Amino acid sequence: MDRRDFIKTTAAGAATAALASCSPAKKTPQAEGGEMEIRTNPRNGDKVSLLGYGCMRWQMKKDEQGHDVIDQDSVNELVDLALSRGVNYFDTSPAYLQGQSEKASAIALNRHPRNSFFLATKLSNFSDWSREASLQMYHDSFEDMQTDYIDYYLLHAIGRGGYDAFARRYVENGMLDFLQKEREKGKIRQLGFSFHGSQPEFDALLATHAQYHYDFVQIQLNYIDWRHADGVRNVNAEYLYEQIDKLGLPMVIMEPLRGGGLSKVPAGVAAQLKERDPDASVASWAFRFAGTFPGVLTVLSGMTYREHLEYNLRTYTGFKPCSEEEIEFLDRMARLMREYPIVDCTHCNYCMPCPYGVDIPGIFRHYNNSVNCGHLPQSHEQREFARLKRRYLVSYDRAVESLRQASHCIGCGQCKVHCPQSIDIPAQLHRIDHYIEQMRRGTL
């Protein structure tokens, strides 16, 4: 069907999401801007802000040598504002921002009392899971963040490679036994894992809770992946939520915007969201959905700029959970959006740098934006095809340097093993490159 007919189509029969109960929610007054929604961790009583700060998208700048470095002044300003408005959970990793995130986040946070925030980081031993390298990464986190304890420590991105990968990274090298002992000493206050994978992998990993006694789990949850995950690379968040909630474990939510995709939804979906609530931003619907479920402890957002933080503060200050009818409405929107041929990239940049210089996230971002905005040329029969074709090609050359475009992908596959969404990145790059070549040769 063409885009106009598609937008008119309404999916039927969306079921109501079940809201499982976990820890009670309460609010804490703040100095300005009203009340930040606070959730109580049922495992230890921590009072955690429903809005959590994901520290993987700090603003970057060039230093005197031309290297990409984190803009520390920007980080300090954002952390100060977040803390003043009740945000107290900060999530980082040794893998974020070319290894710079932990140190930059800590510089900003350590200007404040240590008991005024919760610090979360990860054992991100993707490339070298030897005991020596894993221990070094663990100890380096304490050094880089200048702290005596870590509030929430995660085994990073479990699921990729199944149970065998989990065993190699954390069991066979003795790291899980070591981390349990560190928890007993108080060096780690809460021990958990973040999950990316399919249902069989999740079931096998969650079964290890009986042995390792996790304190929390971090999952991807948004109103598309709630019931419309592809089932191969990831699993419906509704299932993840229900299984974790049965164990009484609180959940930390990542990708509430699906890599920013739910802030730039297709035009027809955006119109329906605006019709429902003209004063609400498109993104606020996704954040409200993620925070609706009481088993959720905090919802992470990687807020690069002040306006991102301000928007999210408005959503979680005087928080209004989604009603059952609104959840049904969002499910209908999710069904519509799954019909669009976008690449499920969340722009986490784990695939970067590409050894051949390909700007993988930039290529996917440009393509997805064109789809979502209705600017994707499809065929000569399409209305205003020539204009759309010219617009796409010009904007592509502006968005992605010629030497970093999809045509330079040689299919080495190094990026695939790092993708949390298990995207076949070379295949998608070749698909987009073939599409672009068809436009340039006039054969589309």
Image (cartoon, helix red, strand yellow):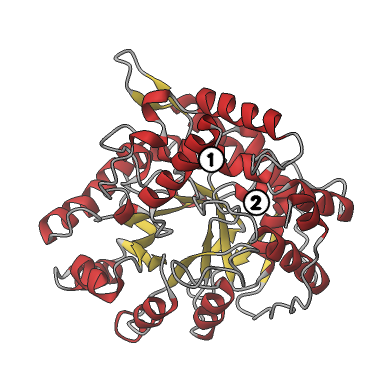
**What's the residue type where badge 2 is placed?**
Leu
- Residue nearest the viewer, comparing 25 with 223: 223
How crowded is the residue under tag 1: few (<14 C-alpha within 10 Å), some, or many (20+)? many
Q: CA distance from mark 2 to mark 1?
A: 13 Å
Q: Position of residue 129 (x, y in %)?
A: 17, 59
Q: Position of residue 256 (x, y in %)?
A: 59, 56
Residue 205: mark: none
Residue 262: mark: 2
Give the residue at x 52% y 30%: 440
Residue 85 vs 323, above or below: the answer is: above
Q: Position of residue 281 (x, y in %)?
A: 76, 46
The residue to which callout 1 is attached is 365
Give the residue at x 30% y 79%: 212
Residue 57 visible in this rendered orientation of the protein? no
- Residue nearest the viewer, comparing 339 with 160: 339
- The secondary element bearing badge 2 is classed as helix
Give the residue at x 52% y 51%: 343
In front: label 2 or label 1 = 1
- Residue nearest the viewer, comparing 356 with 307: 356
**If the image is split into quadrants, where does the N terminus sit?**
bottom right
Q: Position of residue 47 (x, y in %)?
A: 57, 62
**Disc 2 or 1, which lies upstream in sequence?**
2
**If the image is split into quadrants, where does the C terminus sit?**
top right
Give the residue at x 62% y 72%: 227
